[in-house]
Image (cartoon, coloured by chain):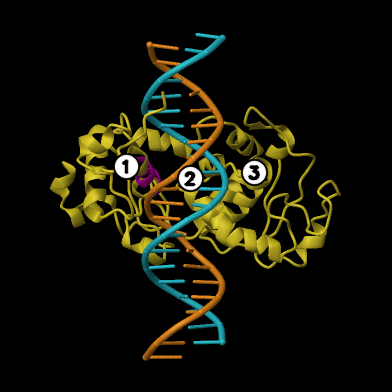
Chain colours: A yellow, B orange, C cyan
DNA sequence: AACTTTATCAACCGCTCCAAT
DNA sequence: TATTGGAGCGGTTGATAAAGT
């Protein structure tokens, strides 16, 4: 007996989500939470697969999402984390508040990968190209060739035990020029400079960001939403939310709701 | 201006993981 | 312990925009 498909492929709609569908999904989750993704589409009146709803929510509609291009520091952190974790995009994303695994994966494949190759670094091994993976990695060879990404030296071998990195990784630092905002820089530099905090971030325990999301998930009480000024392109047409309410708060979640009609969200 | 190529990103697919039974 | 089914993850695709010729 085969396994039942997650949804009736003949009934479910595919392709880009419409504003109307977004509205239904947001409205339902705000009101009821997402108890069961499989059952959600029917309950919410959507002709979508539960998986599709989950993806849409986690990658696009979630209120704590920070959209727009990754800042230099975020990019640097992704490279660093990728060197430790490999293509574990969800784990990497969990270290970058407001970023999704899909977003990071896309960014890696479309931008970072190319930059690293351009710099003569193998994106998969993080070793210089034309060099055996086991050979000693010498970051000084790279610093002169890197344009806007600098690779930090790997201290010791990459180790991960049950998802928790050992101490010599936790003390690693990220260097490089940046073009992100002062607040981001301050935040990130504090993280990097605080070994204890960084060590904590390496652990698999729930991060502060995740916790804050959890806190705000019960109807988003007390959560501040903001528009990320850095966003660009198509993303600018969609809601940009973050729980911290930093970086200039000129577009709130409620504004977005207003576009649909606040009443539609049950407020 | 028209066409082609390249880049980007939202969304889908199929698989694995893991909790419940 | 084995089975089942939901959730989540990573790879890939396809549509669209932007850049180049």
- What is the spatial separation of the Cα atoms under label 3 and label 1, in whole angstroms? 33 Å
- Disc 2 target residue: A97
The percent position of residue A140, horizontal first and vertical second, equals 81, 59
Image quadrant where residue A142 sits: bottom right
Residue drawn at the location 53% of the way across and 58% of the way down:
A71
- Between circles 3 and 2, the one closer to the viewer is 3
Q: Where residue A22 is drawn, which disc sits there?
A: none
Report if the CB atoms under discs 3 and 1 are less than 8 Å apart: no
Q: Which mark is residue A9?
A: 1
Q: Quadrant of residue C5?
A: top left
Query: Which one is earlier in the sequence, the residue at label 3 or at label 2?
Result: 3
Magenta residue check for A55: yes
The quadrant of the image that shows the C terminus of chain A is top left
Q: Is residue A225 left or right of residue A140?
A: left
Please, which chain is the residue tagged with disc 2 on?
A
Query: Do residues under tags 3 and 2 come within 8 Å of each other at their CB atoms?
Result: no
């Amino acid at each position: 007996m085969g396994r039942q498909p997650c949804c009736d492929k003949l009934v479910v709609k595919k392709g880009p989500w419409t504003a109307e569908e977004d509205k239904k999904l947001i409205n339902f989750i705000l009101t009821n939470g997402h108890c069961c993704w499989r059952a959600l589409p029917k309950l919410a009146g959507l002709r979508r697969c539960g998986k599709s709803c989950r993806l849409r929510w986690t990658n696009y509609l979630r209120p704590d999402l920070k959209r727009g291009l990754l800042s230099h520091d975020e990019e640097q952190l992704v490279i660093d984390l990728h060197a430790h974790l490999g293509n574990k995009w969800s784990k990497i994303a969990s270290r970058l508040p407001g970023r999704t695994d899909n977003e990071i994966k896309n960014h890696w494949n479309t931008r970072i990968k190319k930059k690293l190759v351009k710099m003569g670094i193998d994106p998969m091994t993080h070793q210089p190209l034309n060099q055996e993976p086991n050979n000693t990695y010498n970051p000084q060879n790279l610093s002169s060739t890197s344009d806007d990404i600098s690779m930090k030296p790997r201290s010791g071998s990459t180790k991960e035990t049950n998802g928790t990195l050992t101490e010599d990784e936790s003390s690693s630092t990220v260097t490089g020029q940046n073009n992100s905002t002062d607040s981001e820089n301050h935040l990130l530099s504090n993280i990097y400079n605080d070994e204890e905090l960084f060590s904590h971030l390496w652990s698999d325990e729930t991060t502060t960001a995740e916790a804050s999301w959890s806190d705000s998930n019960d109807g988003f009480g007390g959560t501040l939403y903001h528009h990320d000024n850095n966003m660009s392109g198509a993303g600018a047409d969609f809601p940009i939310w973050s729980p911290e309410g930093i970086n200039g708060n000129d577009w709130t979640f409620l504004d977005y709701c207003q576009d649909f009609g606040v009443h539609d969200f049950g407020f």
